[in-house]
Image (cartoon, grey):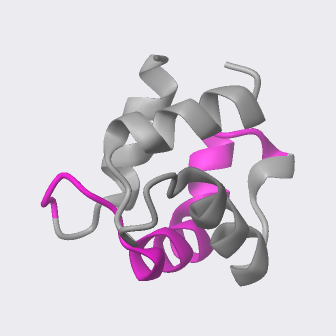
Amino acid sequence: MSDKARILFDALDLDRDGTLTRAEVIGALLTKGPTLAAQGVIPVWGVGGADDSSALFDAADQDGDRLLTFEEFAAVVDRRFGW
């Protein structure tokens, strides 16, 4: 799994509990997404709206528990962003 996935996961984990909720993913990508893209953490085309962020969460939540572990998250973003 990529270092970029870890950086992105940590940036989105607003409460620092080691998992991501849908609200964290949506809120953090909306507020931090442009900065993360400018820093090269995510591609510019990876910054979208709430619907895009929600779809990313759904794609990653493989076990349906409404929480993303780093492993679930990284598997999707590594593939989606081509890392």
**Count of numbered tags:** 0
Give how far across and how far down residue 24 sits, in percent.
Answer: 40, 74
Q: Farthest residue toward the left?
A: 17
In the image, the segment drawn in magenta is: 16-44
Q: Is residue 49 left or right of residue 45?
A: left
Q: Is residue 7 left or right of residue 13?
A: right
Give how far across and how far down residue 70 sits, in percent.
Answer: 34, 40
The answer to which quarter of the image holds residue 59 is bottom right
Q: Is residue 17 left or right of residue 63?
A: left
Do we see residue 2 in this rendering? Answer: yes
The answer to which quarter of the image holds residue 48 is bottom right
Quarter of the image with the C terminus in it = top right
Name the residue: 44% across, 82% down: 23
Do we see residue 41 in this rendering? Answer: no
Give how far across and how far down residue 52 sits, in percent.
Answer: 77, 70
Secondary structure mainly formed by the magenta segment: helix
